[in-house]
Image (spheres, helix red, strand yellow):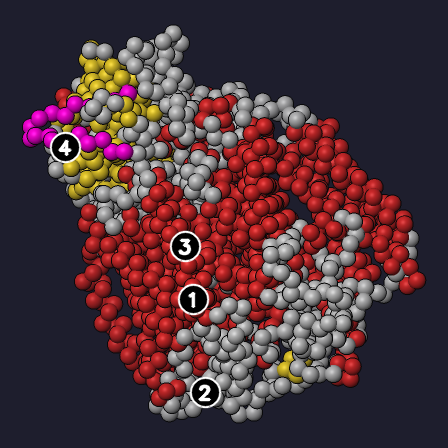
Amino acid sequence: MSDQQATVSRTAGGPNHGARLAVAWLVISAIVDPLFWFAAGPHMPPGDMTSSASGAQFDFNVLMMAALPVTLGVWLYFGYAIVNWRASKGGSDLIGGPKARGNMKIQTAWIASTTIVVLSAFVFGTVELIVPAGAGGGEGPQPIWTPTSKTVLPIQVIGQQWKFTYRYPTYGGFETDTLMVPNNTTIAFHVTSLDVIHDFWAYQLGVKADANPQQDNVAFTTTHALGKVTVRCDELCGIWHGAMFNYGHVVSKTTFQQWASSNETQLAAVTKLLPPFSWTYTADANGADGVYYPDNVDKYSKIQVYGAQPVSVAQAVKPTS
Amino acid sequence: MGIAMAWPPRDEPSETVRGKGRYVVGRSARLGIFSSLLAVAVGLVVFVSMAYLRSEPPTLDFAAGHSQGQAVDMTLQTVGAIGFGTHPSWVSYLTQAPDGKWVHTTLWDLPANTRVNVTIDQYDSGSALRNPQVGAVYGTLGNAATLNGKPFSLIDATKGNGVGHTFSIPTLGINVPLYGVNGNAKNFCNSAPCTLSEAHNTVEFSFMTPKTTGQYGWQCFVPCGGGYVYGNGGPMQTISFMDGFLKVVS
Amino acid sequence: MSEATSTRPQLMSTPEEAAYELRAAEGAIWTGSRLLVGICLFVFASLAFAYFYLRSANDAGLWRPHGMTAPTSIGASVFAITVFGALVNYYGTLRMRKGLVVDWEVSGWIGVGSLLLAAGMQIWELTRMPFFPGASGYSSTFIGWAGLNTALLLMSAYWLETLLARSIRLRRAVAEDGGPSRSTQPPARLFRANLEGCTTFLGLAALVNLVFWVLFYVVV
Amino acid sequence: MAISMHESVGLGRPGETPPSGADRRRSPWLGQHIGTALVGAVAGYALGHFIGNSIASGYANVQLNRQNNVATVLALTLGVVGWLLGVGALNYPILKLVGKEPAPEIEEKGWGRYFRFTLDHKVVGMQYIIGVLLFLFTGGLLAMAVRTELLSPTTHYFGPGTYISLVSEHGTVMMMMATSIITGPIAGWLIPLMIGSRRMAFPRVEAFSFWMFTAGYLVIMTALPYGGFPTGWTGYAPLQTQAVGGMDSYLVGFAVVGTGMITAGFNIIVTIINYRAPGMTWSRLPIFIWSLLAVASLLALATPTLVTGGLFGILDRTAQTAFYVNERGGSAFLWQNLFWFFGHPEVYIMALPGFGVVGEILPVFTGKPLFGYRVGAAGMIGVALLSFFVWQHHLFQSGINPDMRPLFMLTTELISIPTGFIYLTGMGTLWKSKIRFEVPMLFALALYFNFLLGGISGVFLSDVPVNVTVHGSFFVMAHFHYTIMGGLVFAFFGGLYYWLPKMTGKTLNKKLSLIHFWMMFIFFNCTFFPLFIVGLLGQPRRVFEYAQRLQGLNDFSTISAYMLASSFLVFTANFAWSIFIDPKPAPANPWGSRGLEWQSPTPVPFHNFDRIPVIYADPYHYGEVDAPDIADFDKVWATAGAGASSGGAGGGGGGFGAGTTIEGGPSDV
């Protein structure tokens, strides 16, 4: 913005409004930007418990570095105009005619500078999306940006009206209401739904992925701090959407091992009733389908029809196909 | 009519174009008309919000006269078709009020941090589960429940009569499946309230209400809203049918 | 007008103003009919998007599980009759340009009849389907097509019919001025602009029918 | 629309005096009006219900749940048809079947005309004002209900089902309103006056769009008695397919309002292209008209996708097709794609007219010409074009096409460049100006303040990594309230305060207007700014339970929302008092505008201009000593306008005839 203001100032007489504005703007930016970066930045959501959370925090702060000067610059300009150029104070000598109707330099500078800002934001955003393996967002069934880590813990997140459950395919495929995540581990969340669209939002993990029926939506993150995690449904899914939340924990690897093995044993009886593990959670062959479609020719839920092939636990360790 | 206009424009009106007295009725009459329209609008809004939007089934009070440490007994029933009201064909829960009457509600006042003994008479037939995980009992006291007097911890919904409904409080981690009755039973109950002479299963369990007061939603996890995609519409999304609140009070 | 309803002088357009507004009205009909074609194209493009989306997302074999196809003979008839109606009308407009108004009227009525017949057959086809509407992606999009095409055909028939009815009245009204095809009277000029727009729209109907006939019956 | 291709010009000369005996000051109770429309709607509704019950009461799903969607859809659809028949909107389309010429467009008198199907765009404009205010205040009351529920994180004022229905109803009503809030009332009233035309191109289509709009209001209001709908305004399937009867009201309502939007956009485009006065070249067009041209092309071309998508939804719910049910060959993503292909242009439908309004207001109150007029106009067209290519940014976390995310991030961020032009024109116009802080100017400046926050937060949303946190949270909710309410609604009120003196000939009370502005501005920001923070701290949209720690911010927002709502009470009181109860005459041109619309007499005669004006200059010659006349209103065409009658574009060609062939008057450059 300083470009334009400086240019304007050269074209007009009287006090050098452009220079004043530019100086004020530079001073304000020089104060506000570092202030935000150092004082507020480290506390910005969603925190830094995982790679994707800290990535989102970093990106947010970087965007703020550009957004604050732009916003304050525009407000400063408007404030300056309101204070200085009011008719009740006499205002300026009116400029009419072609001079007031446009200024090629300013217009070009404006377009060029906004284009540069926008393209930089695009390049930055793309890098920040691709390098950290999708930045914690749901990448669909065939993720194209995958983590570098050799070992990935897959956790299947199942949305249903109205709760989330979690299946751990590498631990016998048990299913539980509680989300437990080991620390310093790369996780692949395989998010799917039994019915309508939900959205798995593990706030502190910096992970968000829609849960679609018959779809496997994969999101990656790597944990690096212990703590409590809030999980909320972020896509309107019916009456209890607002109550569709629960809490998870990032725990040490050994605690997680103990928890997982004990659950595997304790829940063995239930696990036996569950359908064989697959990337989309296919309803049981006799599962209630609501009898909305009366033809009964192609009932839901025959695994062979819907293509969701069961996979062995060994296959399940590496999430990508 | 060219307009080479002075700047800034003159303050006084350059041309008065419309006078008063255009209206058929006088000023006070217009004021009256407007005020009454406003009053009607306000009345309509208040009526709609109070009489319609805020209307809800009655809340049964299990907390009144409750003394500390004493357990609360609560009896519910589930029925395949409520048989009355605006949605006679919907499945529903009913609650027995302390005076013994069956009330079509799922809202209860319960004292905090108190043991609640629940008896559910299940009159509905069952089906398989979309998610068999909800066939397990968990979150009750001792993770225990009895079916017709016998303890059980898991129902395989693909066998026998399947699961009719569940009683689940997701935020408290409580889940109890209710075994279905035979849909072909001669004495199958077709409309509420059902009586014990009709085919039913009795499920009993206990749970502790939380220490913090507030409203805790509960629901059924069996897709029993027939005629809706995924079986989760209609009664499954309507308070007093398959959804309700524990209103935990101190 | 004997008793003036307004205190200001009655509006009297100069001939130049009248000509100006007449050209604006003609231009409005031209622009409007093209815009209408654009609007309808977006409607059918949405349908085509649905078709290709569901077809390409066929990972679970649910696009057309049992090789089901809507009744091919009825479908081909709907397509053929629609194209026939549009072509007949177009031929009629060529005749009308030579001053043969009645020729166009005959072909126009044939066109209306064809379009109505096609719409009727499209509805009849719905009762002759070998599949349930919700059986597959194909069946769903087909039902959508049948509904939208019926609406399109009825709309085209309506438009053409209004022009035919107008033409009959115009023939009398502008008889001494060269008839609807030659008259320079405003109603005749607007009528011709309107007919031109309608013919364009029928071209759209024929095109859409061709595309979706290929999609639903030929390359399924 | 085709059905109303009018023949404006009867057998006689255009504009010839109507046939005798046509004193249109008829009794307001006679003929067709809103009362007969209601009767028609009720009759159509009952008929539709009857037909639907005879068709579908035996369906298996209807037997199970006694919810007959076929009957509901037919009842609502035929209700709308009955409404249109009752008000007389279909009289001419029916008469056309027997070749009848349209009735002459003659002036109606008396207050009864405001309740009729009328061909005067100025009357339709006034009808639209009341219509959009009805929509706005209904949506506002629903918002109050939503905010009331959010006073407490755990105790509930409404049931959860009712709450979601209120949220959905609020969103839908407001979206429907916002599509028309400026294009209906202000644009409908002003376009012919601003381009020097005596009429809209298709006056019946103009009126039709209004009566569809009101029918849409009635239809969407039936959602509540039908049990509401749980999907929010986005109507995501398969929840849509699963929902109770209120969903039918949503789908039919959007189709009805959508049809109204298409027809309104259609009419605006055709009028602007064809009915510009001689000399009203493209470079002399007011910036507001440019914005309307951009908006109208979005209205006409994006909305068909919504209507088609809604039709698929209706088929899923009635004919049991499976467009949106994954398990049967459909795809829930299909709805998301179709909906947002409409939905994102829709967002700009709700931004661009606001830019146009402030573009008109700023030059008047700064006494300077609009800065960068061409850039501003190009920006609006650019926004309109780009808006067709950004829709998947709503689906960044959905699992659709992850490989496309960088592309949609780019297009989304690119759109901020043409949007930035609006700031360029605004800031350039303010440079060394003489600002008069009249009420319309305050609203215009407030738009620049608010929209900046809305726009900048949009860049955060477009950044995919940040989107992971803010998608679907209160952050996005605050973002679009800042753009739509902070932008469009502020522009609407600015426009009302600016043009109402022209429209009604009456002066609004300045003190009340100022109170309204300051309350609205302050409490708008107090209501929505905290919601950015609430969203960043993890509160998803459309929830009735939230974290205890967020109660303070939510309560602050709720209380501010109550104050915001009361600012509209001030406006209503002002409007009623100044227009109806105690009217004070307004000066002919109270703001000293050079706009063409201010140069016609007040009240504007039925035909707007006795002589079609010949335009000499654009309306922004402020601050010039020898400013040219904008137009000649008494040009005797027979001598001076010779160009007008030459080169007639016969046979339907020449869509760009008007405005370009005349070479009257000096050039303005």
Q: Is residue D411 magenta?
A: no
What residue occupies the far left of the structure in this picture?
B68
Mark carried by residue D435: none
Residue A299 visible in the shown view: yes
Along the line of sight, which residue is nearer the eye, B222 or B76?
Answer: B76
Task: Give the crowd class for mark 4: few <14, some 14-19, many >=20 residues within 10 Å.
Answer: few
Left or right? Give the position of C112 relative to D244: right
Mark 2: which secondary structure?
loop
Which amino acid does the dot numbered 1 rest on? Leu
Mark 3 and mark 2 residues within 8 Å of each other at the beta carbon: no
Mark 2 vs mark 1, foreground winner is 1
Which amino acid does the dot numbered 3 rest on? Ala
Same-chain check, marks 1 and 3 = yes
Q: Is residue B65 magenta?
A: yes
Compare marks 2 and 1 and give the one earlier in the sequence: 2
Compare marks 1 and 3 and give the one earlier in the sequence: 1
Mark 2 vs mark 4, foreground winner is 4
Mark 4 and mark 1 residues within 8 Å of each other at the beta carbon: no
Q: Which residue is mark 4?
A: B64
Same-chain check, marks 4 and 1 = yes
Residue drawn 39% across the image and 37% down it: A197
Compare marks 2 and 4 and give the one earlier in the sequence: 2
Mark 4 vs mark 1, foreground winner is 1
- State which region is magenta: B58-77
Mark 1: which secondary structure?
helix
Mark 2 and mark 1 residues within 8 Å of each other at the beta carbon: no
Same-chain check, marks 2 and 1 = yes
Q: Which residue is mark 3?
A: B41
Percent from the top left, x then y, of residue D386? 51, 58
Mark carried by residue B11: 2
Q: Which residue is mark 1?
A: B31
**Pointer 2 chain:** B
